[in-house]
Image (tube, helix red, strand yellow):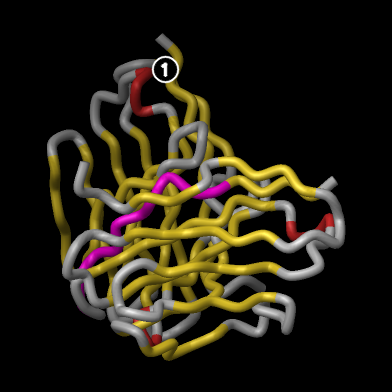
Amino acid sequence: KNEVEQSPQNLTAQEGEFITINCSYSVGISALHWLQQHPGGGIVSLFMLSSGKKKHGRLIATINIQEKHSSLHITASHPRDSAVYICAARTSGSRLTFGEGTQLTVNP
Amino acid sequence: DTGVSQDPRHKITKRGQNVTFRCDPISEHNRLYWYRQTLGQGPEFLTYFQNEAQLEKSRLLSDRFSAERPKGSFSTLEIQRTEQGDSAMYLCASSPDSYNEQFFGPGTRLTVL
């Protein structure tokens, strides 16, 4: 069992739909990161959170420390949101342990 | 551009050859991380530096791998006697300290023939 697990692995949505990607972790963490990776490899940090909820534009990230679970929500999804979304747990020494990623495709 | 840069972006080599990658972090970022990502998988931690000190190494980092950050600025990752299983994207990231987000470079894609 991976220390960080994401679901679903693949997600296809129609433009405008509300999207949720889930992340569960089994290790103690100091923070949980959500990252976006586009084809070609570039990774962009979306959120870093250790409690509660953060919002940036159409993106919302939540975390429940007791349940060791985080979610990334995208409201009013758009084809340009198509990418791989990765959650990563920051553990001891500040290393990141990554989930396998969720491939999101938003169709027009 | 003041982001994290990596060089080269692509490297094709023959099995058994040595390769070296370079990462230039964001200026004044004390922490520098190396990760490896194989196709269809999330990245995996390799090692990280606090200034010039290498503080942690993954068990993934075999004896053929060595990383340095001699002056606490840029870092190099060398792979000796490359194997086909080393083919992957090698990602570098930097952060101001252990509490902040990490900023990723574009990666170096290594193909070992």
| Residue behind mark 1 | A14
> What is the crowding at mark 1: few (fewer than 14 residues within 10 Å), some, or many (at least 20)?
some
Residue A103: x percent and y percent? 53, 37
- Does residue B100 show up magenta in the picture? yes
Residue lying at 47% horizontally and 49% vertically, measured from the top left: B7
Main SS class of the magenta portion in the image: loop
Residue lying at 46% horizontally and 66% vertically, measured from the top left: A24
Is residue A102 depicted above or below B37 in this figure?
above
The reply, left or right, for residue B49 in relation to residue B20 is left
Residue B19: x percent and y percent? 67, 59
The reply, left or right, for residue A94 in relation to residue B28 is right
Chain letter for mark 1: A
Q: Quadrant of residue B57?
A: bottom right
Span shown in magenta: B99-108
Is residue A92 depicted above or below B106 in this figure?
below
Q: Quadrant of the N terminus of chain B?
A: top left
Which amino acid lies under the numbered mark 1 shown in the image of this protein?
Answer: Gln
